[in-house]
Amino acid sequence: MRKNSIKNTRVNGEVQRELSRIISREIKDPRIAPMTSVVAVEVAPDLKSCKAYISVLGDEQAQQDTLAGLKSAVGYIRRELARTINLRNTPEIRFVLDQSIEYGVNMSKLIDDVTSSLSEDDRDD
C-alpha cells in the first residue's frame, strides 16, 4: 500500500468531516439510522473516487436500510460536498459498511461476560 501524501491525508480528513456533517444534519431520510458515523474516508489521489467507511449502531436491518438511504442520497451528498469543499473534482462516493466498532462492542461484552462469570465462580468457593 502506498503511503498517502500530506495533501491526500488532508483531503481525506476534510471530506470525512463534511460527510459526517451532511449525513447527520442535512439528510432527512428515515432509513438512515441516527447513530451513523463516518469512520474513515479514502479519496483516490486523482480525486475521482472515494470510499467512505460508515458505522451504524443497530441490527443488520438498520445497517442495510442506512446503506440504501445513503446510496439513494449520493447525488445530493456529492453536490453538498462540491459546494463546501473546493476540489478540482468532486469524487464519486462509495459507501462501505465498517463493522469494526460493532465488533469491538461485541468483544467487550464477551470479555465482560467471562470476567463476571469468573468472579461469580470465585464467590462460590
Image (cartoon, rainbow, N blue to C red):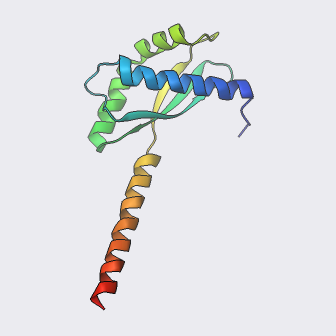
Q: Is residue 68 above or below residue 117?
A: above
Q: Quadrant of residue 88?
A: top right
Q: Is any atom of residue 73 visible in this view?
A: yes
Residue 105 at x, y percent in the picture: 39, 53
Query: Could you tell me which quadrant the C terminus lies in?
Result: bottom left
| Camera-side residue of 58 and 17 | 17
Q: Residue at x 37, y 66 (%)?
A: 112
Q: Is residue 51 above or below residue 118?
A: above
Q: Residue at x 30, y 43 (%)?
A: 60
Residue 114 at x, y percent in the picture: 36, 72
Q: Residue furthest bottom?
A: 125
Query: Could you tell me which quadrant the N terminus lies in?
Result: top right
Residue 121 at x, y percent in the picture: 31, 84
Left or right of 29? Residue 105 is right
Q: Is any atom of residue 43 visible in this view?
A: no
Q: Is residue 102 above or below residue 4?
A: below
Q: Residue at x 36, y 79 (%)?
A: 118
Residue 19 at x, y percent in the picture: 47, 23
Q: Quadrant of residue 30?
A: top left
